[in-house]
Amino acid sequence: MASAAVQLLGFLLSFLGMVGTLITTILPHWRRTAHVGTNILTAVSYLKGLWMECVWHSTGIYQCQIYRSLLALPRDLQAARALMVISCLLSGVACACAVVGMKCTRCAKGTPAKTTFAVLGGVLFLLAGLLCMVAVSWTTNDVVQNFYNPLLPSGMKFEIGQALYLGFISSSLSLIGGTLLCLSCQDEAPSRPYQAQPRAGTATAPAYRPPDAYKDNRPPSATSASHNGYRLNDYV
């Protein structure tokens, strides 16, 4: 019962991580305009994501434009996009495997494959969390380096967007949930059929010993036969 509760907790955390990873991939709030120097008071803010860049006006209007060319994008942006897409795909497959392998579901109930599916789901959630963590960490490092670059104009500097914070949280949830799924499915020692074993103090039956009268195949004497009620004259 405890392992089933741990499985359910791990699945819920992993599912939340998967939803957060999808939202992080779609949102354009990976980079936002840094309000430093002469840009402290501005009427326009710029946002950049994996798929589009947006402009936010002080009047509350958003204007977004999708990237037209894939090859014209920076390499770090292309790598982050690929990592996040793979992370989302792995999270979806992991969710399906975990549903089949959980003890609270009826799929493949009573078969060894159920535990295998649960462990596979946990491992895939771990991989998805690692890929998401690598993508957001890489982008965060790039944003921080450009922000502290003295040769870069203040108008071209960006800060860490809200999507990166959400990516860190989502990847952490996926890692924790995948770990719980794997730990809750540790193989137990297979039970062996009971076999009765002889007791140490049980005495064995004594070996058969023939009566003394039949030793050396000697025929009974007349005296012993007469005592037993038999007479030799009846058989001669």
Image: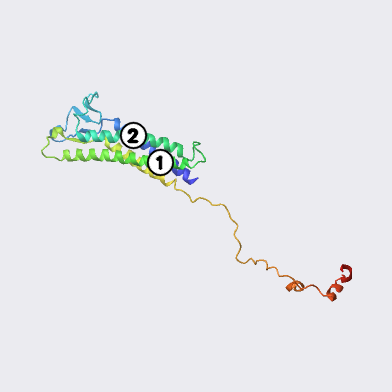
Type of amino acid under label 1: Leu
Seen from the viewer's position, the closer of residues 218 and 94 is 218
Instruction: List x then y, in percent, for residue 123.
Output: 37, 42
State whether residue 86 appears in this view: yes
Q: Residue at x 26, y 33 (%)?
A: 81
Look at the numbered discs 2 and 1 and tell me whether their residues touch, using CB distance below 8 Å. Answer: no
Q: Secondary structure at mark 2?
A: helix
State whether residue 231 appears in this view: no
Give the label on residue 120, or none: 1
Seen from the viewer's position, the closer of residues 201 and 214 is 214
Image quarter for residue 60?
Answer: top left
Q: Residue at x 47, y 45 (%)?
A: 3
Quadrant location, the C terminus: bottom right
Give the label on residue 163, or none: none
Seen from the viewer's position, the closer of residues 224 and 236 is 236
How many dots with numbers?
A: 2
Which residue is outermost to the left?
Answer: 151
Seen from the viewer's position, the closer of residues 46 and 77 is 77
Instruction: List x then y, in percent, for residue 107.
Output: 49, 36
Which residue bears the numbered disc 2? Answer: 88
Image quarter for residue 134?
Answer: top left
Q: Secondary structure at mark 1?
A: helix
Q: Residue at x 41, y 39 (%)?
A: 11
Type of amino acid under label 2: Cys
Instruction: List x then y, in percent, for residue 167.
Output: 30, 37
Instruction: List x then y, in percent, for residue 218.
Output: 76, 73
Which residue is outermost to the front?
Answer: 236
Is 222 on the left-hand or right-hand side of 207?
Answer: right
* Label 1: few (<14), some (14–19) or many (≥20) C-alpha neighbours in 10 Å: many
